[in-house]
Amino acid sequence: MQIHKRHPWTKRIVIAVALCTAIIFSFGTTAAQADLGAAAKSVPSASLVGEGRMKFLGFNVFDAQLYAPNGVYSSSNPFALRLTYLRNFKGKAIAEKSAEEMAKQGVSKAQLDGWTKQMAAIFPNVSSGQSITGVRTASGSSVFYLGNKEIGTIADPAFTKHFFDIWLGSNTQNPRLRAKLVGAGS
């Protein structure tokens, strides 16, 4: 019986394959961190959870992507929701539509009036292709980014819950989009 010696390059191949595998698996997190830009600092180990498109009366409104630590969404942990608009919108209209959706959740008019003013001061006019990213921080605040630039914060945890529930809550007006974002649907 003859015993075969290993070729001297076998060890190098094994090491090269291991390094390539490590790079490939770490690339997802790196890509997500790069996608989120400055928002990534508030979402450790951010990875894409899910994505979907919002349509209204047959018109494409925005593409949404949800990022969370290690790709696992929890409403009580940090996460980032990025909306890439497919049409031009006024910042005031974004704020008013957000308030309208929160009203459907039972938020009082008095509370909404204050939040609407804060949102209107934060949300800029957007052109097709621009993204606004909202981050739920570990402390429960909401931090907003236009592209890679921080544009404002609302520190009220009640606002944060109701604002993100527009897309991610169990009583959202668009359950199909929610399912895609949280990874529960195709």
Image: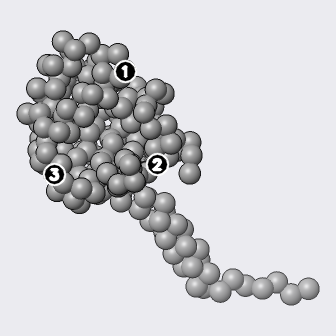
First in sequence, mark 2 or 1: give its number.
Answer: 2
> Which residue was labeled with disc 3?
126
- Above or below 36: residue 27: below
> Which residue was labeled with disc 2?
50
In the picture, measured across the screen, residue 143 lies left or right of residue 43, that is left
* Residue 99 in sight in this render: yes
- Above or below 137: residue 50: below
Compute the Cα span from label 2 to label 3.
23 Å
Question: Which image quadrant is residue 3 in?
Answer: bottom right
Are the residues tagged 3 and 1 within 8 Å (C-beta)?
no
Q: Identify which residue, 22 or 81, lies in the foreground.
A: 81
Q: Residue at x 18, y 54 (%)?
A: 88
Residue 11 position in % (x across, y down): 59, 77
Q: Residue at x 38, y 29 (%)?
A: 165
Compute the Cα span from label 2 to label 1.
23 Å
Compute the Cα span from label 3 to label 1.
26 Å
In the picture, measured across the screen, residue 76 lies left or right of residue 109, that is right
Residue 177 position in % (x across, y down): 46, 44
Are the residues tagged 2 and 1 within 8 Å (C-beta)?
no
- Above or below 87: residue 153: above
Q: Residue at x 25, y 45 (%)?
A: 133
In the picture, measured across the screen, residue 16 lies left or right of residue 136, that is right
> Which residue was labeled with disc 1?
105
Type of amino acid at the residue the image marks with label 3: Val
Sort mark 2 into few (<14), some (14-19) or many (20+) by Cα contacts within 10 Å. Answer: many
